[in-house]
Every structure is written in structure tokens, then in C-alpha cells.
Image (cartoon, rainbow, N blue to C red):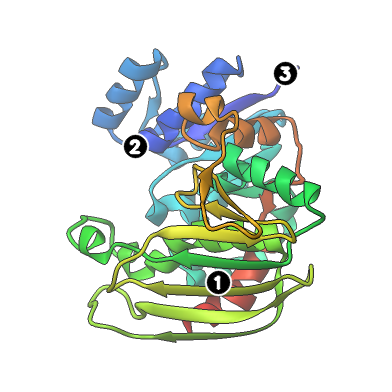
Amino acid sequence: MKNTVLIVGTGPMALDYAKVLQFQNVPYSVVGRGEESAEKFRIETGIKPFVGGLQKYLEETVLSDKTNVIIATGTEALMDSLLLVLKTGAERVLIEKPAAISIEELIKNEKELMPYSHKVFVAYNRRFYASVVEAQRIIEEDGGLQTMHFEFTEWAHKIEPLIKAYGVKENWFFANSTHVVDLAFYLGGKPVQWQAYSKAGALKWHSKTNFTGAGITEKNVLFSYLSNWESAGRWAIELLTEKRRIYLKPMEGLSIQDKGTIAVIEHKFDDSLDVKFKPGLYRQVEAFINAKQGTLLDLSEHIRFAKDNYTKMLQ
């Protein structure tokens, strides 16, 4: 029996997943809460979602043990949805990052989550960017990574007016900035000896606005980072090998500065899948459906990293 997929959610992210699944000829069904978003989903995909919420759906439906679940709800509903799904017979679960509205919510549910952590993966799709795959190829070609610098500056003036569920903006570092942090330490290895510093600013909706730190990773890569949400900046990662400096800036693109030169040259690579679909999503879904777990972030690792490193960066 071929695996099927249940998508939880009918918003923009769920639509992005549906487009990939349809292209990959993977059968799927959808469950959502509201009629309006469900109708938009039907118009876009031709698939009519179950309306009424996940709990009602699970009360009326027995999931096959060949069902893979993709949770693509709003951040505030991720953990509640995951806890409901884990009580079913689902084979594997892919949950949108960061799997909870806050580090505290994630850790609070650790005991209940851990027995299932081997089959739950957190969807940090930037690990699957074509630019990242190409950067990894170049790093290997050059003999490995030596040093790394990254930045996760958020545009606070753009975030401030956004209407979000309570707790989303207040935990913006965890909900959004960890896109960059996860990718940096995925490429360079987990930090083992390091110092982190942060301080508050004038923002009323987030406790910290300035971040910096430095250290060394398990792969013997020296790293540093800097982020100021009240100044200028952007998301970026710089990767230094013996032969060149690789820029993921913007992260969907790739530029290179060769050793002994000043010029930073745009590097061409095949990013056709990231143009056709939401960047990284095609390869991420492919890895999830085919149980290729090397690049996917499993839930237990995510929880450990949140406790040991995200918490440290915020203190």
C-alpha cells in the first residue's frame, strides 16, 4: 500500500506543500478549521479539505499506519496539532518550524513528545535550498569549512504592525530567526565551546534586540554571529574554506570571493526546483516521503538544541 499524506492546515504554507505533493504524484487529504481558507485551498488545488478542525477529523477518521502527516498550521497551533496527531497511528510527522510557539512550550511537552521523536521531523526547509546543496559541494571540494559568520537581523519595523496570535511576535527569535541559526550550525556543526551575549532594546514585543557570540563547533569550525534588530542588516551566512569565501546573502543565492581577490562574483547553479516551488520544499518533502533522514531535523535534536543553544542565545 502506497503511503498517503494528511496535511493539517489550509493556509499559504499548506498550499505550498500541496503543490509539491501533487507534482510528486503523492496522494493526500487535507483538514482545516475555517470555511474561507478551505474554499481558497479547494480553488487552488481541486482538493476539498475537511472543515471543522483536526480533533473533529480524528474523531471521525482512523488514520492508516501508512499515513504521513504534514502539520502546516499557524505557529500558535503547531504543538496542539502535534500532540493530537501523535495519539494516532501515523507513520511519520513533518511539522512546520519551530514546532511550538515558544521554547518553553516545546520543553514543557518534552516528556510526552520523546517516545515519538524518532518519527517527528521539524521542517527547516532552508537546509534543502539548492544554494545550500551547492555550498556543501564547494566546501567538500575545498577540503572542508574553516570559519563561519552569520547574521539573523530581523526588520522590526516591518514585523511591528503585523497582526499575529499572542506569543508569536513575542517569540520571534524562536519562530523566525532560528531559520538562520539552524542552517548555520547544520553546515558548520553544533557549537561546543562558545560565549553568547544579548541585550534588550526599545522593542515592546520582544525581550531582546541585539545578539552576538562566538566559539568553535564540533567540526572544529570557528564561528561568530551578530544581529541588531534596531539597525540595518539582513539574514546572511558566510562560509570560509581554504580557497574562498561563500556568501549565502540572500540565502536563496550564492556568491563567491576567491582567495587573493576582492571581487564577489555571483555563482550560478541549478535552482529550478526552488523557482518552481517554495525554496527548499521539493527536496524536503522528497526526503520526508522517502524516509531519507540525514538532512531532516528530528524532534529530539531540535529539543536539545533549543534547550542548550537557543536559550543561551537569548540569555
Q: Residue 50, image x and y in percent?
A: 41, 26
Using the rendered view, name the quadrant where residue 27 is placed. Answer: top right
Mark 1 / mark 3, whichever is N-terminal: 3
Taking the image as drawn, is residue 207 in sight?
Answer: yes
Which residue is pictured at 40% across the width and 17% down the height? 45
> Closer to the camera, 156 or 30?
156
Separation of marks 3 and 2 at Cα, in angstroms: 27 Å
> Closer to the camera, 42 or 287?
287
Label 2's element? loop
Badge 1, how many Cα within 10 Å: few under 14, some, many 20+? few
Separation of marks 1 and 3 at Cα, in angstroms: 35 Å
The answer to whether marks 1 and 3 mark residues whose Cβ atoms lie closer than 8 Å is no
Separation of marks 1 and 2 at Cα, in angstroms: 26 Å
Task: Identify the residue under disc 2.
Answer: 33
Badge 3, how many Cα within 10 Å: few under 14, some, many 20+? few
Q: Residue 282, image x and y in percent?
A: 58, 30
Which residue is pictured at 47% across the width and 66% down the height? 151
Which residue is pictured at 67% across the width and 28% down the height? 64
Q: Of the residues tagged 3 and 2, which is closer to the observer?
A: 3
Seen in the image, is 61 located left or right of residue 175? right
Question: What is the three-letter code of the residue carrying label 3?
Answer: Lys
Q: Residue furthest right?
A: 143
Q: Which mark is residue 108?
A: 1
Using the rendered view, name the quadrant where residue 272 is placed. Answer: top right
Mark 3 / mark 2, whichever is N-terminal: 3
